Image (cartoon, rainbow, N blue to C red):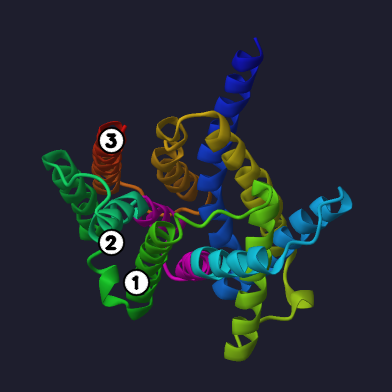
Amino acid sequence: MISDSINKKAYTAVAIVSFFWGTTYLVSRVAVQHIPGLFLAGVRNLIAGSILVLFFFLRGEKFPDKKVLQQSALLGIVMIAISSGMSHWSVQYISGGLAAIIGATISLWMALFSFVAKRSGKFSLQTFLGLMLGFSGILVIFYDHLKELMNSNFRFGIILAVISCITWAAASVYTSGIKLNTKLLFGAGLQMLFAGIFLTIITFITGQTVNLNDLPGQTWIAMFYLVIIGSILTYSCYVYAVTNLPPTRVGAYAYVNPVVAIVLGWLLLDEKLNYMIAIGTIITIFGVHLVNSSFRKSQTIETDSRI
C-alpha cells in the first residue's frame, strides 16, 4: 500500500513537471517583453535559490562546507546560469513554442556527448535514425520560418536556444560524476543561488538591467510564477519523481513540454501553429524517443556485462 501511494504521488509529480515546465516558455515570453532575458534568469534563480536555502537553514540544516560550496557554484554557473540564461534570452527573439521544441533536442545532444566524451552507450542504428529524425524535425519546422531567418534578431534567438541546449547537455555529461554531499533540494537551492548571483552580476556589468519599480503588473506575476511554480514547485516534483520512479518514465516530461508550450503559445499569445510545425514537432519528439530508448538499452547491456 505504501509503495502504491508513493507511485501515485510520483506519477502525479511527473504530470506536474510535464505540464508546468512547458508553461514556463510561455510565461518567460511574457516576462521578457519588459525585462531582459538574462536579468530575468538572474532574478528568478536568485529569489528561488534564496527561498530554498533559507527554508533548509530554518529547518536546522548546517552551513555547507567549502567543497560543497565549490561544487554548487560550479554546477550552478555551468548548468543553470549559462543554459537558463541563454534560454530566457532566446525568447526575447523567438516564440516560446519554438524555444521548447529546440529544448527537446537536449536528449540528442546528451547522447552525442556521452558517446563521444565518455564512450558511454552504443551508437546503434536506432540511435543514428533517432538523431537524424530529431534534427530533421527541427529542419521541417525551420522550413516554415525561412523568411524569419532573414531577420538577424530571429537568427540570434535561434543561436541562443541552441547554445542553451548544447551547454546543458555538455555540462550534464561533464558533471555527471559530481554528487553533492547534501540533501537534493538544498543542493538545488545552492546551485540556483550561485547561478542567480552570477547572472545578476553579469547583467549589471553588461547593462542588461531594468528598474524593477517600472515593471508592469503582468511582468511581476510572470516572475512570481517562474520562481514559485517554474523553479521551486516543479523542480521539487522532478526530484521526487526521479527518486521514486525509473528515469525512463520520468523522462516522459521531455515529450510533453514542447506540446504544452506550442499549444498555449498559439492560444494565448497568437504564436504560429500550422501543419508544418505540428509535423516537425512530432518528428522531433519521435526522434528524441528513439535516441533515449536506444541509449537506455545500450547502457543496461553495458551494466549487465560488468556484473
Count of numbered tags:
3
Q: How far is the residue under mark 2 from the one under mark 3?
A: 20 Å
**Residue at x-position 20% and y-position 59%:** 143
Q: Does the magenta stretch include residue 99?
A: yes
Asked where in the image residue 54 lies, by quadrant, the reply is: bottom right
Disc 1, SS: helix
Task: Check disc 3: other Cα within 10 Å, few if <14, some if 14-19, many if 20+.
Answer: some
The disc labelled 1 sits on which kind of residue?
Ile
The local secondary structure at tag 3 comes to: helix
Span highlighted in magenta in the image:
82-104
Residue depicted at x 28% and y 35%:
293
Residue highlighted by disc 1: 159
Q: In which quarter of the image is the N terminus?
A: top right
Q: Is mark 2 on a helix, strand or loop?
A: helix
Q: List the residue tagged with mark 2.
A: 117
Residue 262 is covered by the magenta coloring: no
Residue 265 at least partly seen: yes
Taking 22 as reference, is 124 left or right? left
